[in-house]
């Protein structure tokens, strides 16, 4: 499996996801620069976390119009899987690959901590490494991770099984205390209609090595690699 990681000025998690994918596949991912108009054929496109373009204007808004994103959207339309993590989620949402928007955390503060996530579906290439209802622990690091969409969109996401992850307690309860950024319906990650595009705010790539304090993200990458092998 060949993965490609899109790098913007201000990206800061590209090496983290590079390492996670390298561990899972045994093959080094490619890196593509935001000014490139194209990049080599890939089985997976990853847009990592960070602060693209310094988060000026609005998180992900400028990056969504970078030259490289035209190629990303064209390939996504042809079914090439796209994974957006944290700032990557903001970028692909701004680019129209996913519905909704990422707003400022309800606390108005930057959140950097471990959170628990409930896996809502195992029926996607991104979540097949887990069981539906499983609870995992991974880090977050964001200021604008408050997912929002209108009620009709949310009902459609729920009805089509496109909510991938929700913030929850260690016991799997969907409560307010576990949803500190204020995301509507505790949503932490969503899928597109074909379930080939996933955006999520937490960082599974930073939970793939015992030295990082959790290996709960290993299932994410192992399942993804198995699906795309």
Image (cartoon, rainbow, N blue to C red):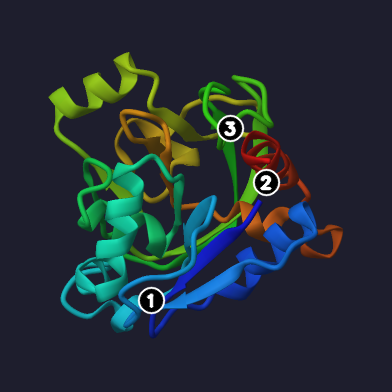
What is the quadrant of the C terminus in the image?
Answer: top right
Please tell me which residue lies in front, 32 or 189: 32
C-alpha separation, residue under disc 3 versus residue under disc 1: 26 Å
Residue 154 position in % (x across, y down): 24, 27
Q: Is residue 157 left or right of residue 31?
A: left
Q: Residue at x 27, y 43 (%)?
A: 98
Q: Earlier in the sequence, mark 1 or mark 2?
A: 1
Q: Which residue is mark 1?
A: 51
Residue 33 position in % (x across, y down): 42, 80
C-alpha separation, residue under disc 1 versus residue under disc 2: 23 Å
Mark 1 or mark 2, whichever is nearer to me: 2
Label at residue 3: none
Q: Are marks 3 and 1 in contact (CB under 8 Å)?
A: no
Mark 3 or mark 1, whichever is nearer to me: 3
Residue 111 position in % (x across, y down): 47, 63
Residue 219 visible in the current orientation: yes
Q: Residue at x 64, y 57 (%)?
A: 205
C-alpha separation, residue under disc 2 versus residue under disc 3: 9 Å
Q: Is residue 65 left or right of residue 171?
A: left
Q: Is residue 48 above or below residue 2?
A: below
Label at residue 127: 3
Q: Secondary structure at mark 2?
A: helix
Q: Residue at x 75, y 54 (%)?
A: 25
The answer to which quarter of the image holds residue 193 is top left
Q: How many marks?
A: 3
Residue 112 position in % (x across, y down): 54, 65
Q: Which residue is mark 2?
A: 221
Q: Secondary structure at mark 1?
A: loop
Give neighbour class at mark 2: few <14, some 14-19, many 20+ (Cα, 10 Å): many
Q: Are marks 1 and 2 in contact (CB under 8 Å)?
A: no
């Amino acid at each position: 499996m060949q993965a490609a990681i899109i790098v913007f000025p201000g990206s800061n998690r590209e090496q983290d996801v590079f390492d996670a994918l390298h561990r899972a596949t045994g093959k080094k991912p490619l890196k593509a620069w935001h000014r490139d108009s194209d990049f080599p054929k890939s089985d997976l496109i990853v847009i990592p976390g960070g602060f693209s373009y310094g988060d000026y204007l609005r998180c992900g808004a400028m990056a969504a119009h970078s030259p490289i994103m035209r190629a990303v959207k064209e390939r996504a339309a042809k079914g090439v899987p796209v994974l957006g993590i944290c700032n990557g989620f903001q970028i692909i949402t701004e680019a129209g690959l996913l519905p909704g928007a990422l707003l400022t955390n309800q606390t108005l503060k930057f959140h950097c901590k471990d959170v628990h996530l409930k896996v809502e579906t195992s029926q996607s290439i991104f979540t097949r490494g887990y069981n539906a209802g499983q609870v995992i622990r991974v880090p977050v690091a964001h200021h604008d991770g408050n997912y929002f969409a209108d009620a009709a969109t949310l009902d459609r996401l729920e009805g089509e099984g496109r909510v991938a992850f929700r913030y929850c307690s260690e016991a799997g309860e969907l409560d307010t205390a576990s949803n500190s950024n204020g995301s509507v319906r505790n949503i932490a990650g969503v899928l597109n209609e074909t379930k080939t595009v996933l955006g999520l705010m937490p960082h599974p790539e930073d939970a793939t090595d015992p030295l990082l304090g959790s290996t709960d993200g290993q299932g994410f990458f192992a399942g993804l690699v198995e699906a795309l092998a």
